[in-house]
Image (cartoon, helix red, strand yellow):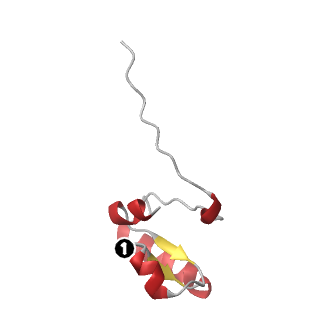
Amino acid sequence: MARLGRKYQVHLVSGLDGEFVRRCHFQSVSPERHEAVLESLLQETGQDARVAVIPYSGFTLPVQHEFAEVT
């Protein structure tokens, strides 16, 4: 997951210590502010921004599949 934080802008909504979250290469967002932060990010990047929400991310490992072209 930390690799994602190096490659993409990842905001972690959590009650974890902010310094710990930053060391994991994520940006800390308090649960109380998550809606305001998301709205701000969408204004910054545009309404067509690609957003992924991963609930229970401690139990989720995102996998990107690359498919070979069949000739």
Where's the C terminus, which quadrant? top left
Count numbered badges in the picture.
1
Q: Is residue 57 above or below residue 13?
A: above
Which residue is at the far top? 71
The residue located at (34%, 65%) in the rendering is 6
> For this rendering, which residue is in front, 28 or 43?
28
4 left or right of 35? left
The residue located at (43%, 65%) in the rendering is 2
Query: Residue 23, position in %: x, y?
Result: 40, 78
Dividing the picture into quadrants, the one containing residue 53 is bottom right
Dividing the picture into quadrants, the one containing residue 22 is bottom left
The residue located at (61%, 65%) in the rendering is 58
Disc 1 residue type (three-letter):
Glu
Dividing the picture into quadrants, the one containing residue 66 is top left
Q: Is residue 6 above or below residue 26?
A: above
Query: Residue 28, position in %: x, y?
Result: 48, 81
Q: Is residue 52 above or below residue 18?
A: above
31 left or right of 23? right
Q: Is residue 65 above or below residue 16?
A: above
- Mark 1 packing: few (<14 Cα in 10 Å), some, or many (20+)? few
> For this rendering, which residue is in front, 35 or 48?
35
The residue located at (47%, 79%) in the rendering is 21
Q: Which residue is mark 1?
A: 44
Q: Secondary structure at mark 1?
A: helix
Query: Residue 70, position in %: x, y?
Result: 39, 16
Query: Residue 17, position in %: x, y?
Result: 52, 87
> For this rendering, which residue is in front, 60 or 49?
60
